[in-house]
Image (cartoon, helix red, strand yellow):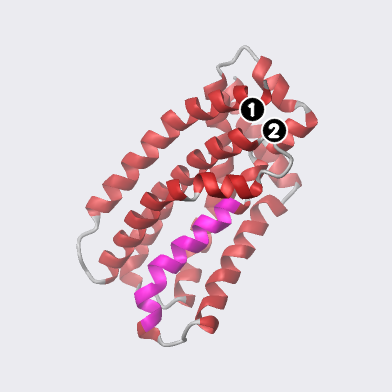
Amino acid sequence: MAFTAVIRRDLLLAIRHPAQAIDPLIFFLLVIALFPLGASPRRELLELVAPGVFWIAALLSTLLSLERMFRPDFEDGSLDLMLASPAPLPLIVLAKIIAHWLVTAIPLLLAAPLFSLLLGLPTTALPALLATLVLGTPTLSAIGAIGVALTTGLQRGGVLLSLLVLPLYVPVLVFATGAISAAANDLPFTGQIYILGALAALSCTLGAFVAAAALKIATS
């Protein structure tokens, strides 16, 4: 099946080129580690800003890896084969989104407990942190797929990609940081989690169709 074949192919490429997963993780770690040095090491301040800093780092590290979703396929001709494939293009795009999420988000999920300690995040907020990462990062990948699809044919589309997707990432940032802050203060956060889940379902379904249409436009 084309869906599983695309996921398997992208995962094998990521294994052969581990920098695809390591580079965003290193960038994430640098942002988390440098923030206390640039702001203040006081625990009270770190606990206050930790949710925002954590998710801004996650957002930027995801943005760093977005161009690898379609651009290598465009450059080596694989994208033309995908467009000519009898398999539905939105299904192939959805497979690319899932593969990107597995490569970039899973390492962040595994490292999140350690990184949260660097910012002094209370342990009571860890479940909310993991839940927001599980539900929020698929939205980042799906929205990013639309931006990458629109800029695939451009020589230097990195800046344009950032301008396209960063405003669309704001709802995820707001509700994710709100959930973590609420959990850190022993307040209910299920409402924010439900909204993040709805955003993930909506972006992954509609995003695949929009990105597929954008790919056809960008490569025509």
Residues at badges 1 and 2 in contact (C-beta under 8 Å)? yes
Q: In which quarter of the image is residue 188?
A: bottom left
For label 1, the crowd category at 10 Å Cα-Cα, with few meaning under 14, some 14 to 19 and many 20 or more, is some
The amino acid type of the residue labelled 1 equals Ala
Element marked by disc 2: loop
Front residue of 19/176: it is: 176
Kindly report the distance in space between the C-alpha atoms of the residues bearing marks 1 and 2: 6 Å
Q: Which residue lies furthest to the top in this view?
A: 86
> In front here: 11 or 50?
50
Q: Is mark 1 on a helix, strand or loop?
A: helix
What's the magenta region? Answer: 45-63
Q: 200 left or right of 15?
A: left
Is the C terminus in the top left, top right, bottom left or bottom right quadrant? top right
Say which residue appears at 63% left-offset and 64% top-offset: 26
Height in image: 208 above or below 187?
Answer: above
Question: Would residue 46 be counted in the magenta stretch?
Answer: yes
**Could you say where residue 80 lies in the image, as x and y percent from the top left?**
72, 22
Task: Give, as a three-letter code, the residue at label 2.
Answer: Gly
The correct choice, above or below, for 155 with respect to 214 in the image is below
Q: Mark 1 points at which residue?
A: 218
List the single residue furthest toward the bottom. 42
10 Å crowding of disc 2: few (<14), some (14-19), many (20+): some
Which quadrant: the N terminus? Answer: top right
Q: Name the residue: 35% across, 41% down.
A: 199
Q: Mark 2 points at which residue?
A: 153
Earlier in the chain: of badge 1 and badge 2, it is: 2
Horizontal relation, residue 74 to residue 107: left or right: right
Q: Does the magenta stretch include residue 157?
A: no
* Residue 176 in picture, x, y percent from top left: 36, 56
Q: Quadrant of residue 186?
A: bottom left
